[in-house]
Each structure stands twice: as C-alpha cells, then as structure tokens.
Image (spheres, rainbow, N blue to C red):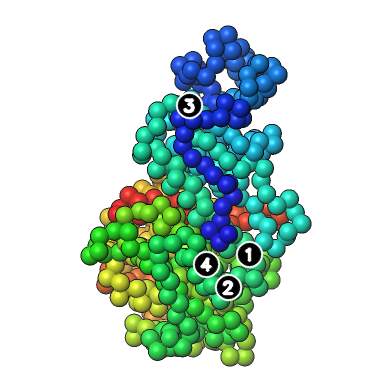
Amino acid sequence: MAFYKALENIELKKYSEVNPETFAVVFYSKTSFKNSNLFDKEMKQKVSTYFEHEKRSSMLLSKELTGDKRDVLVVKDFDTKKADHKKYQWLSNVFVGLDKYGVENAAIYADTSSLIKDKNFVFDLAKIAEKTTYRYTDTNPNTKSEAILKTIDVCVEKLNASLKKSVEHGFNVGRGANTARNLGNRPANHATPTYIANHINELAKEVGGFTVEVLEEKDMKKLGMGSLLSVSEGSVEPAKLVTMQYKGGKKDAKPIVLVGKGITFDTGGISLKPGAKMDLMKWDMSGAGSVIGTMCAVAASKLPVNLVCTVALSENMPAGNATKPGDVVTTMSGQTVEILNTDAEGRLVLCDALTYVKKFNPKVVIDTATLTGAVIIALGDVAAGVMGNDQKLVDRILEAGQNSGEKAWQLPLWDEYQSYLDSNFADIANIAPGRAAGTIEGGCFLSRFAEDYKWAHIDIAGVADIGEGKNKGSTGKPVGLLFEYVNSNR
Ligand SMILES: [Zn+2]
C-alpha cells in the first residue's frame, strides 16, 4: 500500500455500537471516572482506591478479576497542568501499552478523559495511534514486521458529525505522516527521484482526487531551470519536478501551494560533507516527503480547498561533470547565482520550483525544507524555523504549529541580512562568506524568488528526523502542521 496504513481501522462509535468483548481503555480522573456509566459503584470504588493510594499511571483489570466480558485498561487521565507536548507522549504511551499487552482490537472510551472538551482530542488520538503503530520494514523484512494493534474504536456516549470527521482526519494525517516517514526512511539507493515520482503516481491512483504531472530534465531545461539542473548535474539519477493538484474547493478559488525540497541524497557535491553520519543525508528529501504526505491526508479527507504541491527531487553528488564552487548558473527567474558552496543545494532546487509555481496563481506559497544545519543550532529538535514576506501568513503557520504539536518559531528576514548574499560575479551568491545567521541567509536567498506572492519558508532540518544509532528515524513532521494550516485557512 503506497498510502501508509499501520492500523487497519480507527473509527468513532457510540457505546452501544461497540462489541462488549473488545478490550477497553478508560481514562481515570476523579470526576470524569465517577461520572461515567462504565462500571458499577463497587468497581469504581476499587479503581479509585487503587489509583489514589498506589499512584500508578495505569492498571489492568482482567476479566477474571472483574467478572466482566472484557479486560479493561485504566489509564490515569492527562494532567492538563502539564506542558502541552507531554499530552502527545502520554497518548503515545497508551498505544505502546496496548501493544505490550498484545491487544489487537481496542475500544477507547474517549469521553472518560477530561481532554474530550478539547476539540482536537479525538483528532490527536487517531493521529498518534496511527503514528505510534508505524513500523519500518521495507528493507528489513526479517524484523518483527507489524504492530499487534489492528483496530481502534474511539467510543463516546453521543456521536456527532464533527467528532466523526475529526477521527477520520486524525487517521489520515497519521497515515500522511507515516507515508512521509516511510519515504524518508527508505535508503537513498531505493528512494531515488525516479522512485519517488513513481510512488507519487501510485499514491494518486490509490488515494484519488489529485492529478500528477512530472517534469523531466529536458522539460526543466526548456523552462530555463538552470539552478535546479545544476544540482543533478553530477548524478546519474535524473532530477524530477513533480506537481500534484487537488481541487476540492471552489473552481475559481486560488490554491494554497506547498513546495518541498527533495534531495534524495546529499553528499554536499564537490563541497563534500565529512563522512561521519553522512547516512543522515537520505532524509534531505523530508520537505518533499512531508508535502506528499500532506497532499494524501488532504485528499483522503476531501477537504474543501484547492491545493497544489510541488516537489523538487534530485541527488547531489560529486562527479567529473558536477557543478563546482564559483560556477555561475541562470535560474528560471532570470537571476544569476554564484554557487559558492555546492552543499547549499536545497535553495538551488527550491528557487526554480518557487518561480515555477507562480503559474498556479497562488493564494499563498509555503515551502518546507531541511535547508540548514544552522537551524539546529538555533532551535534544536524542538521547533522548525519560519520566515516569510507576509506576517499574517507567518502568524498562521506558527498557530498551526502550536495547535498540531509540531512547533515552529519565527526568525527575522530583515533587509539588513540580504546584503550577506552580494556577489561580484552574479546577481546573488548561494551562501554568505561567514557562518553568521545561516538559516536566515537561506530564507533571504529564497525570498528573492518569492516576491510575487505571499510566501513563507519552514526550515525543518532540526525536526524532520531524530535519534541516533538504531533509534534514528523520520518523524513525519511537519505533515501535522501543514494539514492544520490548510484545514484552518481554506
Ligand atoms: Zn546540502
């Protein structure tokens, strides 16, 4: 399945629709638990006593103990005084616990949690369930391939259409994020630009609702994309520029346009990177991966919006014919670029993609890219860096970050920084001579190609992949943020 699916199904049900033998999860807090109709008075008293005295975070009530038809996992409710990000960890622990207990089908009584008042709770629940159940198996088929958990009923006493939709959307966003993770985790000898372009076509067939157009190198040459093509020059893998179009909104409504950096492997080119941890550079396509995942989540959720997603896919390799430091290329916009460092290649593919998407008459353009190591120095693995030419757009992205738990933080794009990129051999250099303000300088470069529309840039180099050794992997960020932005700004 191209559109990744870890769980077979997750859906909203009312209490009476749930099989009474399904393994149940209830949340315990003094008030919400007392008010629920799930146990008799005596049982409630037992559970309360246990939780109050033992200070446990969960307890399993087996059917042997309770005489009930099912096992019940009681989980201590989330303490809303805690920081928001802990909510996601808490939810994730619930699903890790279910897997540990070997549960295949679970019924989660969502309204036993005080968080049910939060309109995003069932959305988050579905998203985190799908994300926690994700396993990478594509190139290691001998490892334990699947999580045990297969289906989840999210149970509430009273159904309503908006809750139902939230569960569906959360599941789709989880699947979109997992699709991005799986593309990212696939090694670069497997996930080439050609592979990803083909994969996008498969996704379009499977998910439906969006069209795909693939530009080959000869097409890009005709359009004058000298900058993008300078990156793929040293690679035997041809570059691809893939555009997905989804028209769920009004016919004449301007589309939101997302652009993703898709460097399927970044050696740095002739400005070769050091060898240590170079394998991490397979994730240099995470911007593209997240844009692809977002398109799938939006189309599967049938959001009433017009969305265009463009990904610039290329390898960055050193070779006899590779672009050299000091080379000057002409971009599609007509501006010339002095390439002082071939490792600052993300902006070289993005600038032509940004010029290209002008033809869609965008409402806004948001690009996302693992653009600079400097953003990790600035914000670590906690937040993505955001810059843009329209403060309202930037504010909405920050808000979407807050609401989705995929945080972002603004960096300034003040005019003073623009002169860092002055060149005496071209209109603009691709990097500044010094190391100062590296992330902003990347934003400044891109801003030169985004003057005709409202634009923002999200640098995800710190958040797209995490961990070390055997624990390293893609996070699927910022699919959650992008979906939230699209859904709340349509
Ligand atoms: Zn690079």
Q: What amino acid type should be assigned to the residue bearing mark 3? A: Ser
- Give the farthest residue toward the left: 252
Q: Circles 2 and 1: CB distance less than 8 Å?
A: yes
11 above or below 4?
above
Q: On the picture, is 335 further left or further right than 85?
A: left
Q: Going 44% across and 45% down the picture, which residue do you hit?
A: 168
Q: On the picture, is 65 further left or further right than 450?
A: right
**Where is residue 224, by image quadrant?**
bottom left
| Residue 248 picture location, percent across and down | 32, 59
Q: Circles 1 and 4: CB distance less than 8 Å?
A: no
The disc placed on residue 202 is 4
Q: Going 67% across and 42% down the picture, which residue do you hit?
A: 148
Q: What amino acid type should be assigned to the residue bearing mark 4? A: Glu
Q: CA distance from mark 4 to mark 3?
A: 39 Å
Q: Residue beneath label 3, please?
A: 16
The disc placed on residue 195 is 2
Can I make out residue 407 in this image?
no
Give the mark nearer the N terminus: 3 vs 1.
3
Q: Circles 3 and 1: CB distance less than 8 Å?
A: no
Judged from the image, the secondary structure of the residue bearing numbered disc 1 is: loop
Q: What amino acid type should be assigned to the residue bearing mark 1? A: Arg
The disc placed on residue 186 is 1
Judged from the image, the secondary structure of the residue bearing numbered disc 3 is: helix
